[in-house]
Every structure is written in C-alpha cells, then in structure tokens.
Image: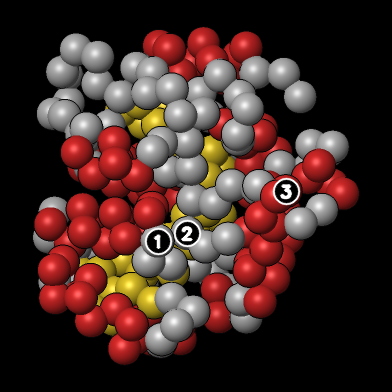
Amino acid sequence: MEIGIIGSGHIGGTLTRRLSSLGHDVAVTNSRGPQSLTDLAAESGARAGTLEEVVQGAEVVVVAIPLKAVPQLPAALFDGKLVVDANNYYPQRDGDVAELLDRSLSSSRWTADHLKGARVVKAFNNIQAAHLMDQGKPAGTAGRIALPVAGDDADAKQVVMGLVDELGFDAVDAGTLDESWRQQPDTPVYGTDRDADGVREGLAAARP
C-alpha cells in the first residue's frame, strides 16, 4: 500500500519505520523539507518528499503533526483521501481552541472540518511511540495491546484497522469521529496499553 506520512516526530517517525518494515511504500514529509529527512529515509527505506508529493500518490495519509498546524494544510490536496488523524490536542502547545477546551467537539471532528472532503479516521493517538515501535505482537497473543479506531466512513475505518493489526495490535471499533473524544488525553484508554476488552471498557467508562 502507498502510505504518506506528514510529520517525522515520535509517532510519524515510528510509523515511517514500522510501515516501511512491513513492506508498504512509505513517503514522509515534514515542515522542514525533504533535506531534513535524509537520515530517516536511509534508516527506514521510506522516500522523503514535499507535502504535495507525499499526499498526491498516497492511498492512506497519516497526519502526525501538532494540532495547531492542521489549519495550515491545503484542504483541497486531501479531497477524497483516507486521512489517519494521529494527533492530540494539548492546550499548552496548541493554544486555546474553545470547542476543544470544553470538549464540545472532538479534535478529530475539528480536523475533519478543516480537511473538507477527506475521509478522516482517528488512530494511533493513544499509544506511546516506543510501545508502537516494539510492543506489537502476533494476532491471538494473550494481552495483545489494542488500539481504538474511530471514524464515520466504515470502509476507511476497516483499512486502518487492518493496518493496526499488521503492526501487531488489536483494533477496536471506537465509533464515529464525534465519539473519538473517548480516546483523547485524560481518558481511560489514553496511554494505558489495554487489551481489546480493556479498551472497550475504557471507552465506555470515559466521561466528557
């Protein structure tokens, strides 16, 4: 699968390495330009490119950048694309966004509102990068870590759940984008490495 990754930090860099190692055709970009990604490309086998190059050729695009940078993305470029939102809203970093501060809007719905026309799926936002890198296990392994996956497009969600499984984690359907606040920071499933049953329990126990 052709996968574009926007962001080369903890989660973006980890997904670049892991998805490349699984045989996917991965292209990565960041705000500093392709020349800053030489080492990551050499290590992982991924291609470094501009934002346009990475998004245009991709079947799946992972967005793993500070949330405050999302409005700077050219929405038209993402029209019709399957976009995986791996971001979290951190007020101390991203500033005050009224709808997100009071949780009247999930951060993924906010992102989808900016990327009109994209099929947005929330995933990979609740696990530590180090665990995403080295805690994947074969399907059926007892205690396998599970990751919640939320989205409005059932087909897009199934594609992302398949990638989660390939990476060595159980995928749990976490509902719609409007319900994805249940996997945001300060919820039971955030950073807690639960198994599938534990994730379902944590999602159900989450409170606004």
Residue 111 numbered tag: none
Kind of element beneath mark 1? loop
Residue 127 point in image, percent of width and height: 41, 36
Task: State how far apart marks 2 and 3 are (Cα).
Answer: 16 Å
Quarter in which the C terminus is drawn: top right
Question: Looking at the image, which residue is at 12% across and 57% down?
Answer: 21
Question: Looking at the image, which residue is at 81% across and 42% down?
Answer: 101
Question: Looking at the image, which residue is at 61% across and 24% down?
Answer: 187
N-term mark: 1 or 2? 1
Label 2, residues with CA under 10 Å away: few <14, some 14-19, many ≥20? many
The residue tagged 2 is 64
Q: Above or below — where is 125 with respect to 189?
A: below
The residue tagged 1 is 9
The residue tagged 3 is 91
Callouts 1 and 2 close, C-beta under 8 Å: yes
Kind of element beneath mark 2? loop
Quarter in which the N terminus is drawn: bottom left
Kind of element beneath mark 3? helix
Q: Amino acid at mark 2?
A: Ala
Q: In the shown orientation, is residue 158 left or right of residue 112?
A: left
Viewer-nearest residue: 51 or 91:
91
Is residue 153 visible in this depiction of the protein? no
Task: State how far apart marks 1 and 2 are (Cα).
Answer: 8 Å
Label 1, residues with CA under 10 Å away: few <14, some 14-19, many ≥20? some
